[in-house]
Amino acid sequence: MPRPFTPKVITANALLEGDVVYFTAQDTWSREMCEAEVMEDEAHADARLIEASRQQNVIVGAYLADVKPGEQGPEPTHFREDFRRTGPSNYFHGKQAEVL
């Protein structure tokens, strides 16, 4: 029996900077997960992933990531996605320095 489909967003890395980005309903990429399009239908999510993957001049490695509703928009359900959006953990720089 297949697992039920759970809400997803499309994520990738920006081609030039390497930052984590999220696909929006306007077919653009945002560095903020709260701006990502949340898809709750598997067929729609697969079609959007194909559309997002065509933007190879902007991103690399697009895939679907599980999310759950949160107060500020979608939130990751897996540690990997939460870790990706905060950046490297070896020292405070980039996104981590901005939070402090």
Image: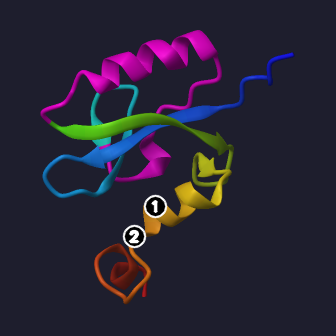
For the C terminus, give its image quadrant.
Answer: bottom left
Q: Secondary structure at mark 1?
A: helix
Measured in 3D between alpha carbons, the distance from the residue under mark 1 to the one under mark 2, in whole angstroms, is: 5 Å
Q: Secondary structure at mark 2?
A: loop
Q: Quick check: is 39 in the magenta stretch?
A: yes
Give the residue pinned by disc 2.
87
Q: Amino acid at mark 1?
A: Arg
Q: Residue at x 72, y 24 (%)?
A: 5
Q: Residue at x 36, y 88 (%)?
A: 92
Where residue 87 sits in the image (x, y, percent)?
Answer: 39, 70
Looking at the image, is 87 positioned above or below residue 34? below
Q: Amino acid at mark 2?
A: Gly
Looking at the image, is 94 positioned above or below residue 39? below
Span shown in magenta: 30-57
Q: Residue at x 45, y 34 (%)?
A: 63
Q: Residues within 10 Å of mark 2 (few under 14, many from 20)?
A: some
Give the residue pinned by disc 1.
84
Where residue 93 sits in the image (x, y, percent)?
Answer: 30, 83
